Image (cartoon, grey):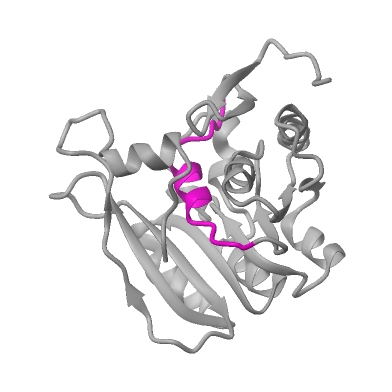
Amino acid sequence: MSAPLQADVSEDGWLGGRLRLRQPRAGYRAGLDAALLAAACDATPGMRVLDAGCGVGAVMLAAAARRPGTRFVGVERDAAAAALARENIALNAMEDRIEVVEAPLAEAVRSLGHAAFDAALANPPFFDDPTTLRGPAPERRAAWLAEEGLGAWCDILTKAVREGGTLAIIHRADRLADVLEWLGRRAGSFAIRPLHPFAEAPAKRVLVRAVRAGRAPLRLLPPLVLHPGAGAARHRPEVEAILRGPAGLDW
C-alpha cells in the first residue's frame, strides 16, 4: 500500500500515464529533460544502472519501464526527494528492480563501490557558480546548483562505472566543451545528440553518451527537434512518442 498523499505533493501521470509520479507541487518537477534522458538509457537486461541525483525517481522509473530486467540504483542527497522516490517505486511496483540511496553522490559511490555499475545516467545541476544562477525559486535551488561543480560530477560518474560501461548525461548546450573535457579524462567514444527547440534555433540542450576507457572516434548524431516551429506548444510526433510511449533514443 502506498503512503498517503501529502498536501504539498501532487500525483501525476508519467510516460503517457503508464507510470504514476509523486512530486512537489512547488519546486523542481520532472519534465522534458528527465524524459529524454530516460529514453536515452540503452542498458540491457541484467545490467546495473546508477541514476545520479535521482530526485523523485522520474528518470529511473521511465528507464526501468522501457528496460525490463535492468536494475537501477538512484542516489539522492535531499531527504524529501529520496522519500518521494521510494514512494514512487512502491507506487509503480518496482521495488524488485529499483532502490534509492540517500547520500551525497561522492559518498554514495564510495560506499557502493567504484566500477560497480554497467551504466550511469545524470541530469546534473545546470550551474556550479552561484553568481551565474539565473534566479530559480528558492525551493529549486538545490536542483539547479551543483555545489561540487560539474567537473566533480563527471569525475564521480566515470569512477562509478566499470571499464566499457556507459555514461549518459543531458546538459546545457553551452557547457558541452566542459562535459567533454571532464568526462574525457577517463572516458571516450563520445556520441552527441543536439536538442533543438525548433529547426531554425540553436540547440539549448545536448545528450552526451560516453564509454569508460572508450577509444572510438566522436560521433555527432542527427539532432532531435522538439517543436514544429517557433511558438508552437506541441511537440513533434517523434518527441511525443518518447514522452508518452515506449519509444527510445538510439545511439
Q: Residue at x 78, y 64 (%)?
A: 109
Q: Residue at x 25, y 44 (%)?
A: 197
Q: Total marks drawn?
A: 0
Magenta highlight on residue 43: yes
143 lies above or below 194: above
Q: Which residue of the protein is positioned furthest toward the bottom in this rendering? A: 215
Q: Position of residue 28 (x, y in %)?
A: 55, 32
Q: Residue at x 69, y 58 (%)?
A: 50
41 lies above or below 140: below
Q: Could you say which is closer to the camera, residue 245 or residue 233?
A: 245
Q: Position of residue 95 (x, y in %)?
A: 80, 40
Q: Is residue 228 left or right of residue 127?
A: left
Q: Residue at x 60, y 39 (%)?
A: 58
Q: Find residue 245 and report its image quarter.
A: top left
Q: Find residue 185 and report its image quarter.
A: bottom right
Task: Point out the image quarter for the C terminus.
Answer: bottom left
Magenta highlight on residue 130: no
Q: Position of residue 248 (x, y in %)?
A: 44, 51
198 lies above or below 170: above
The magenta-colored residue range is 27-44
| Residue 151 visible in the shown view | no
Q: Is residue 176 left or right of residue 37?
A: left
Q: Which residue of the protein is positioned furthest toward the top in this rendering? A: 7
Q: Position of residue 164 (x, y in %)?
A: 62, 80
Q: Could you say which is closer to the camera, residue 229 or residue 171?
A: 229
